[in-house]
Amino acid sequence: MTAEDEEIIARWKLAERIAVEAGSHALGYYNRRETLVIESKGDPQDVVSIADREVEELIRSRTGEAFGADGFLGEEYGLTGGNSGFTWVVDPIDGTSPFVHGMPNWCVSIAVLYKGEPVIGVIHVPCHDELYSSALGQGATLNGKPLKLGQQKTIRNAVTGIGANHHVTPQSVAKIVEDLLASGGNFVRLGSGALMLAYVAAGRLVGYYEPYMHAWDCLGGYCLVREAGGWFLPFPSDGERLTKGAPVLATGPGATNDLQRIAGIEQTGVAAA
């Protein structure tokens, strides 16, 4: 094992521990959500509460104590630079809208980038007691059980996840849905992109597409999908581009060509080794 591998694995084990701790903290707020003061970030569907902020602060604190030279990007407090080559990318509660409305479709998403590549992806789903975990070259697991995707599931015999938000037009989302249905597929939208990407890695969804998404929503799921044997469209990670939105697409092997066509994306990307 190289020194680089050891550095990744040390952060991976920490990410697993932090995700469970953060999920437990968030679940406490979820169980008393009627006491939360809900704020809007500018769009009525884009909300935040003290739970999001406290969970991110917890994760920042834990990672900073262990790896003070690492960078950190969180949805609530932005980007803090580092000089180790590693950057933590975190959504403390992905699916805040389901969270505040009493639906279980939310999660804690933790990714780590190394030299711009997602090398760790850990997603904890407290309401279902599920821990999705992956690291570069180490495979992906769900509660310790290995995840491995095959060719047998396609858009025609399985379900695709679709995401939408105020950054994209209703017409563009309608076109995606129309093309998917016309191709013999079907879709769901759960309100948490990170969770739906974890479901792609687990084979519950055959793919996930969202025309505009942020790094903290997708990079943990991207690592999971790659390590499970799937494909993803690379996310721009150079400098400030990491803080901007971009199209997100991840698929199981049997759906890659169809979903690239529906998304209008050239057939290039990152596949599992």
Image: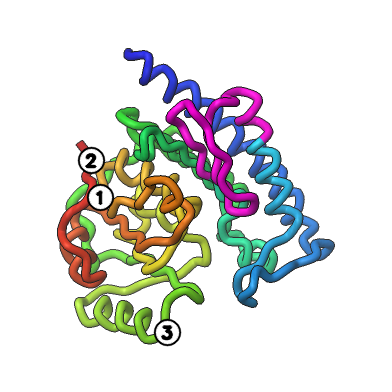
Residue 38 is labelled as none
* Spatial separation of the CA atoms under disc 1 and disc 2: 7 Å
Give coordinates of residue 7: x percent, y percent. 44, 20
* Among numbered discs 1 and 2, the one appearing first in the sequence: 1
**CA separation in Å, label 3 and label 2:** 33 Å
Residue at the far bottom in the pictured view: 171
Residue plotted at (55% across, 26% down): 69
Tell me the residue at 42%/76% (across/down).
168
| Residue at disc 1, secondary structure | strand
* Three-letter code for the amino acid on which mark 3 is drawn: Pro
- Quarter holding the N terminus is top left
Mark 1 belongs to which amino acid?
A: Trp
- The x and y percentages for residue 10 are 49, 21
**Which label sits on residue 170?**
3
Look at the image and give the residue range highlighted in magenta: 61-89
Q: Furthest residue to the right? A: 35
State if disc 2 and disc 1 touch (CB < 8 Å). Answer: yes
**Of the pair 85 and 90, the residue shown nearer to us:** 85
